Image (cartoon, grey):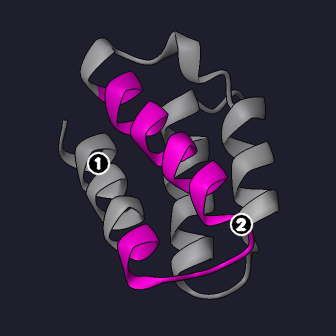
Amino acid sequence: MSTSPEDRIVNVLSRWLAGHVENGELHRAIEESEPRRLAPVHAEAVEELLAKLEESGSERGGDLEKVVRETLEALAIG
């Protein structure tokens, strides 16, 4: 069963929000999901998240959580 990049990213974002995934694992999972295959509006949200992850390092601050939630919303709603 093949899963779309959007589905894989939504899954890992949800797991991150639940505290089951660390920042580094989130970053790797997004990269492995081939974000370049996303629609432009989705790709933009994911690129913003990747930049925020790099800026945050291992910290799980409120700003990062906000960007994760916004990315999740952009991918889920379109």
Q: Nearer the viewer, residue 76 or 63?
A: 63
Q: Amino acid at mark 1?
A: Ala
State yes or no: residue 61 in magenta.
Answer: yes
Residue annotated with mark 2: 23
Residue 74 pos. (x, y %): 24, 44
Sooner in the amino-acid sequence: mark 1 or mark 2: 2
User: How far across and how far down the image is residue 38, in percent?
Assistant: 44, 18
Residue appearing at x 39%, y 83% in the figure: 62
Secondary structure mostly taken by the magenta-highlighted segment of the chain: helix
Above or below residue 48? Residue 2 is: above
**What is the x, y in percent for residue 4?**
56, 28
Of 59 and 40, the residue lying toward us: 59
- Circle 1: element type: helix
Which contiguous range is marked in magenta?
A: 42-65
Residue located beneath label 1 in the image: 76
In space, the residues marked 1 and 2 are separated at their CA atoms by 20 Å
Q: Please state which amino acid type lies under the numbered disc 2.
A: Asn
